[in-house]
Image (cartoon, grey):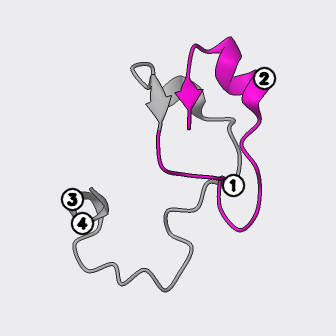
Amino acid sequence: MYCECSPVWDGKDDLFDVGSLDDLGLLPNLRRISGAQDCGPGVRFKEGILAARGIAFD
């Protein structure tokens, strides 16, 4: 999926690391986050914020 957004991304930078959940409103159809333990470098997802928007994660 990352290759669709940035075809030449080599994974060696933080281009796709989530820094905050402030922009969740831009993803109105997001219902599940799967396969991710955290937002980026060790920052855990805030389950309360995700749950309030009906987003499950595992």
Q: Determine whether label 3 and label 1 are within 8 Å by CB.
A: no
Quadrant of the image containing the C terminus: top right
Label 2 CA crowd tier, 10 Å (few <14, some 14–19, many 20+): few
Residue 4 image position (x, y, % from top left) = 21, 59
| Vertical placement of residue 46 versus 11, above or below | above
- Which residue corresponds to the image point at 77% horizontal and 56% vertical from the top-left? 43
Does residue 9 appear to the left or right of 31 in the view shown?
left
- Mark in the foreground, 2 or 1: 2
- Which residue corresponds to the image point at 43% horizontal and 80% vertical from the top-left? 11
Q: Amino acid at mark 4?
A: Cys
SS of the residue under disc 2: helix
Does residue 9 appear to the left or right of 40 in the view shown?
left
Q: Determine whether label 4 and label 3 are within 8 Å by CB.
A: yes
SS of the residue under disc 4: helix
Q: Which residue is mark 3?
A: 4
Q: Which residue is mark 4?
A: 3
Q: Which residue is mark 1?
A: 19
Q: Amino acid at mark 3?
A: Glu
Q: Separation of disc 2 and disc 1 at Cα?
A: 17 Å
Q: Earlier in the sequence, mark 4 or mark 2?
A: 4
| Vertical placement of residue 4 versus 34, above or below | below
Q: Earlier in the sequence, mark 4 or mark 1?
A: 4
Q: Amino acid at mark 2?
A: Gly
